[in-house]
Image (tube, rainbow, N blue to C red):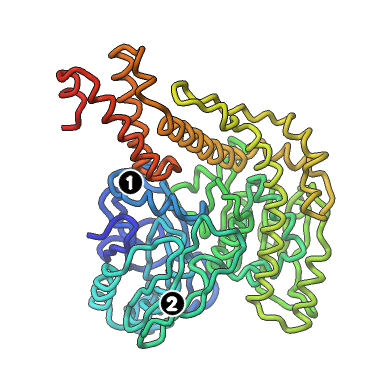
Amino acid sequence: MAASLGWHSTSGTDAVAKEGWCSVWKADKTPPLALFTGGAQVEKAEGSLGDTQFSFRFRQSGGCRRGALWEDGRDYDRQAPLGLQREPAHYFGYVYFRQVKDDSVKRGYFQKSLVLVSRLPYVNLFQCLLQLIAPEYFDKLDPCLEAVCSEIDQWPPPVPGRRLNLPVMGVVIQVRVPSRVEKPGSSPDLSVSQEALLPAPLALSSVYELDLFRCFQPVLTHVQMLWELMLLAEPLVVLAPSPAVSSETVLALTSCLAPLKYCCDYRPYFTIHDSEFKEYTTRTQAPPSVLLGVTNPFFIKTLQHWPHILRLGELKMAGDLPKQVKVKKLAKLKILDAKPGLYSSYKPFLHKDKGLIKRLLKGIHKKRSSEAQSALLRRHLLELTQSFLIPLEHYMASLMPLQRAVTPWKNPPPIRPFQQEEFLKTLEQAGPQLTCMIKGDWMGLYRRFFRSPNFDGWYRQRHREMMHKLEALHLEAISEANIGTWMKHKSEVEVVDLVLKLREKLVQAGHHRLPVKEETVQRVGQHITTILGALPEDLQAVLRPQ
């Protein structure tokens, strides 16, 4: 069996769960990539859908469980960008749904789904895979899935920074998972590999990036406001005309904060059948910090107490620019005949960047490709997020103890606590205005951000990384120290205690939790050998590894 981050697959057709898509999920036994089949209940009433693709996300039964298979994938999570790391408590479902008229069926139409379930957010790769598999499966059924699963079992594991060739059904899908060390927004060489591959590979430019320009077409003039709502983890419902538009819009919204990770729950396609339906629609408490994508108009009534509702219609062109939804008061939200619009009373902290819309309009006039327009939009959002994060990163770095304060035989000094008011005082001289031309109440935006789950998630991640760095510096100081001099005036108890602590640090380094060089680890290992050699034989026997 492949490791946890390999592509070991399985298929199942025996039982149907909440939306009729996938068999009952056993989190402790099911491999990390699985194919399921079954009927489907898509919440769209009118007309025949034909073939459509979308995605959803669901909570793991019993919460977060991290067993041996999870530990096997730590290398991947250490190397992958935060947004592409495995989900510890959720799974992604990628759906290929078919509904066509069929008079031979009692209800008058044939409908069936093929669903791929994974912890990895590789929306482009898995949708491409389903496009190859699903049409064949609908014709040949189970034997087709068995052959596909056999091929997927042989795929190399996804390694960040490395190009992968993934053969399936006579096609080689060529992808590259980005690495965490790459500069955000950089464009590594995505040209087709020169390997002798026949037939020529199907090269994907990204395993996860969506066409932002297409996803945000109806809301281009409000992208910056939506960015603020995502940054502040405001409760938001996206009511879309189809599951495809719903899921793509939600995924685009969560991605617009990159490289900051969106730390709240989000559901690309949420239905009344979801197990969290009552939890998220209750009126007995304030709406949670959740992003929901829905298609059923019933949610307008159920969630009308939510502060932000984005209703999207079918895409229509208005001159050169797709018709833009308007920001409207929530009081104008009618249950049945609500028109497309962003229903919210939110007042943005930042002024709208009109230059972005002008650049996008210029691209439309010049018939610039959607890929180029998306790149422009993604770069704008990336620079906006980076301008917001840079002052936070600089301040966090100032909380780190100086390297000269880290000595070998004392515990490292603590990281200073994050003082919000102290940080805000730094903005006048080192605020976002140094890297961003957008004006507005940046200080107010930071104050609101401090109360959001996204700040908590960012701070916890950065603090953890700094703790690991501090432990690594301490281990390096120990490796360079004269162990013989230290031992001269120490008791056996102190010496034994040091051996145990050094071994614990080496275990952490071995699990890649500490960013240390191999030579540092080797020198500390030699220190342990030297210490053991100076102890009585009975203690040596107890302390030596069995």
Decide which of tag 2 and tag 1 comes sooner along the chain: 1
- Image quarter in which the N terminus is found: bottom left
Q: Quadrant of residue 319?
A: bottom right
In-image side of 316 versus 146 (left or right): right
In-image side of 222 versus 287 (left or right): right
Identify which residue is drawn at 67% across, 47% down. Answer: 389
Q: Residues within 10 Å of mark 2 (few under 14, many from 20)?
A: some
Residue at which label 2 appears: 99
Amino acid, disc 1: Glu
Q: Which structural element holds mark 2?
A: strand
Q: Quadrant of residue 148?
A: bottom left
Work out whether residue 12 can be spotted.
no
Q: Quadrant of residue 113?
A: bottom left
Give the percent coordinates (x, y) of residue 310. 67, 58
Work out whether residue 165 can be spotted.
yes
Q: Which structural element holds mark 1?
A: helix
Relative to 58, say whether 172 is above or below: below
Identify which residue is drawn at 34% across, 18% down. Answer: 487
Nearest the camera: 71 or 277?
71
Residue at which label 1 appears: 71
